[in-house]
Image: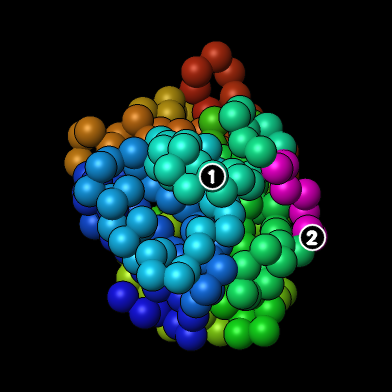
């Protein structure tokens, strides 16, 4: 499916509560193609990528936004088949070329700029096509629903910085790692920033009723989340609490959190 000039999308057959419809793999370029997020190592998906890149076309590189198992593993299978190098964050094991923030990838028809965008994962990159103001967002932004943060204490801080950074680029279109194309990129990023601020407010409001554990907060703030996803909701609540603590708004005693004396939701 052509989602932008010179960009095709292939949907991997790996739907799940975490991956939505499945992982989006993007083929950027007409002749010399950079495959962004090869996806899971599923034979049907590998075959679809190879078929989309045949007849005089060439896979010049395999670029991964981050190392999660729904984004990276097909890169190794494709490297074996076509010999293209794997490009990704320097901390990813088994890749050929580490990508630094600001690097310009010119091995395909379409030049792509690398943006370091941690928050969902420590090793997360986004890819920016400046000429068309298209952002290939990986799991920084999803086409539907919201994003799970990584487990490090400053994940939310970094995530908000990453969102601010891509907002400043004023993307026209966002191509997410999961879900449909996002036609108004800037509006979606602002919506994400507002959503995080709303979560802060909800958590502070929950703590106004008294101190609480993370699980108790999850039950109040993420009441509609199905049980299998509650550990991930807990991870996001933990990330919010860590940031609120760094701002002096909440404090922790053992596994219970409470409002700081001067905090106001
Ligand atoms: Zn991910």
Which circle's residue, 2 or 1, is located before the other in the chain?
1
Residue at (68%, 72%) from the top-left corner?
Answer: 111
Distance from label 2 to label 1 (Cα)? 25 Å
Q: Which residue is drawn at 79% across and 60% down?
A: 102
For numbered disc 2, what is the local secondary structure?
loop
Measuring from the top left, give residue 141's x and y in whole percent.
48, 61
- Name, please, the residue furthest toward the front: 56
Mark 1 secondary-structure assignment:
loop
Residue found 39% across the figure and 47% down from its top: 39
The residue labelled by disc 2 is 102
> What residue is shown with label 1?
83
Does 190 appear above or below 97? below
- For the residue pair 118 and 82, the one nearer the viewer reads as 82
Q: Can residue 255 be seen in this view?
A: yes
- Position of residue 185 relative to residue 70, above or below, is below
Q: In the image, which residues are magenta?
A: 97-103
Q: Is the magenta stretch mostly helix, strand or loop?
A: loop
Q: Residue 183's x, y, as percent?
A: 43, 83
| Residue 173 placement, left or right of 94 | left
Screen quadrant of the C terminus = bottom right
Left or right of residue 111: residue 7: left
Above or below: residue 180 compared with residue 83: below
């Amino acid at each position: 499916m052509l989602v932008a000039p010179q960009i095709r999308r292939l949907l991997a057959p790996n739907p799940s509560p975490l991956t939505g419809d499945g992982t989006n793999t993007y083929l950027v370029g007409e002749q010399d193609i950079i495959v962004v997020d090869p996806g899971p190592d599923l034979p049907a998906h590998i075959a679809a990528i190879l078929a989309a890149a045949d007849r005089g076309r060439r896979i010049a590189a395999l670029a991964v936004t981050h190392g999660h198992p729904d984004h990276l593993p097909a890169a190794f299978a494709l490297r074996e088949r076509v010999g293209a190098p794997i490009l990704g964050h320097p901390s990813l094991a088994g890749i050929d070329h580490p990508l630094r923030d600001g690097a310009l990838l010119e091995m395909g028809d379409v030049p792509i700029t690398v943006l370091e965008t941690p928050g969902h994962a420590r090793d997360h990159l986004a890819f920016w096509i400046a000429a068309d103001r298209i952002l290939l967002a990986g799991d920084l932004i999803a086409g539907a629903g919201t994003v799970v943060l990584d487990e490090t204490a400053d994940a939310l801080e970094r995530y908000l910085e990453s969102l601010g950074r891509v907002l400043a680029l004023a993307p026209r279109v966002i191509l997410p790692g999961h879900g449909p194309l996002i036609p108004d990129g800037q509006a979606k990023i602002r919506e994400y920033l507002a959503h995080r601020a709303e979560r802060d407010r909800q958590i502070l409001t929950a703590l106004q009723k008294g101190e609480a554990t993370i699980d108790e907060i999850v039950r109040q703030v993420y009441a509609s989340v199905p049980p299998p996803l509650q550990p991930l909701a807990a991870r996001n609540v933990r990330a919010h609490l860590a940031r609120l603590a760094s701002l002096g708004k909440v404090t922790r005693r053992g596994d219970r959190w409470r409002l700081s004396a001067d905090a106001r939701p």
